[in-house]
Image (cartoon, rainbow, N blue to C red):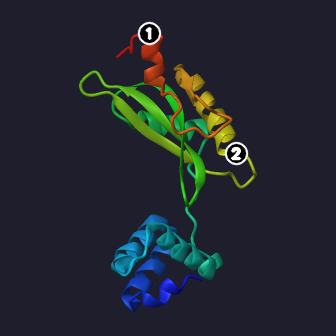
Amino acid sequence: MSGWWAYLEERTRQEVDANVLCDRRLLAVKAVWEALRPLGLGLIEAERVVHGRYEFLGDRVRRAQPDPLDVASLAARAAAHPGRVAAIEALWDGDTVHDWFVVLVAILNNPSGPSGEGHLATVYHRPDGTSPGTAAAEAGHALAQHLGVPFHFASPDVPDDEAPRWRAVQGRAGVPDQG
């Protein structure tokens, strides 16, 4: 484990462990980083400290359950957002903790306000070995078919967080975004 752990005050150690035990990784990293940044600790090293606590605490960590990817759950989440669902989109994203993952969103048209998007699920590497791209593509396509809207995933096979978005593709195709 990183030697930085020894520099933390007991109160901060307890806070970090409480966050790790509840699988709140980002809050744990924030606590470590804020406490030790004045001593020269960088964000990546703070993540390593927290990773060490995950390893140390092992099976005691109550890991968050993955977002459900069944059509009924995703449709309920889509219906909870304001506005009409115009499309379902899958986007690559990534970080130093989870590597690459996919975010499923509902592209929304809101006649009484600004259009936007609503988060439906974050798809990490699956325990069964299915890639996030494959799992997200299957779930997104099934949801889009269920809702009768288009599904867009610009780069299902290769992580690309700069792939063209659905609204941008619609604009280039000269197809108006129907609200």
Residue 28 vertical position relative to residue 108 in the rendered view, above or below: below
Give the side of residue 34 with respect to residue 159, left or right: left
Evaluate whether residue 24 shows in this view: no
Circle 1 residues within 10 Å: few <14, some 14–19, many ≥20: few
- How far from the left and from the top, in percent, is residue 144? 56, 26
Please identify the residue farthest to the front as the structure is shown.
40
In the displayed image of the protein, which residue is found farthest to the top?
174
Quadrant in the picture for residue 174: top left
* Residue at 39%, 38% in the rendered image: 80
Residue appearing at x 43%, y 29% in the figure:
107
Is the residue marked by circle 2 packed among few (<14), some (14-19), or many (20+) residues within 10 Å?
Answer: some
| Residue bearing the label numbered 2 | 131
Q: Quadrant of residue 156?
A: top right
80 and 123: which is toward the camera: 123
Residue 41 screen position, x and y as percent: 42, 76
- Residue assigned mark 1: 175
What is the quadrant of the N terminus in the image? bottom right
Tag 2, which secondary structure? loop
Q: Amino acid at mark 2?
A: Ser
Q: Position of residue 114 (x, y in %)?
A: 27, 28
- Spot the residue most to the left: 112
Which circle's residue, 2 or 1, is located before the other in the chain?
2
Evaluate if marks 2 and 1 touch, with contact meaning CB atoms under 8 Å apart.
no
Residue type, mark 1 in image:
Val
- Expressed as whole percent of the image width and height from the top left, the position of residue 16 reads 45, 78
Viewer-side residue, 67 vs 52 = 52
Q: Which mark is residue 134?
A: none
Q: Note whether 57 is above or below 131 in the view shown.
A: below
Q: Secondary structure at mark 1?
A: loop
- Relative horizontal placement of residue 14, taking residue 38 as reference (left or right): right
Q: Quadrant of the image for the C terminus?
A: top left
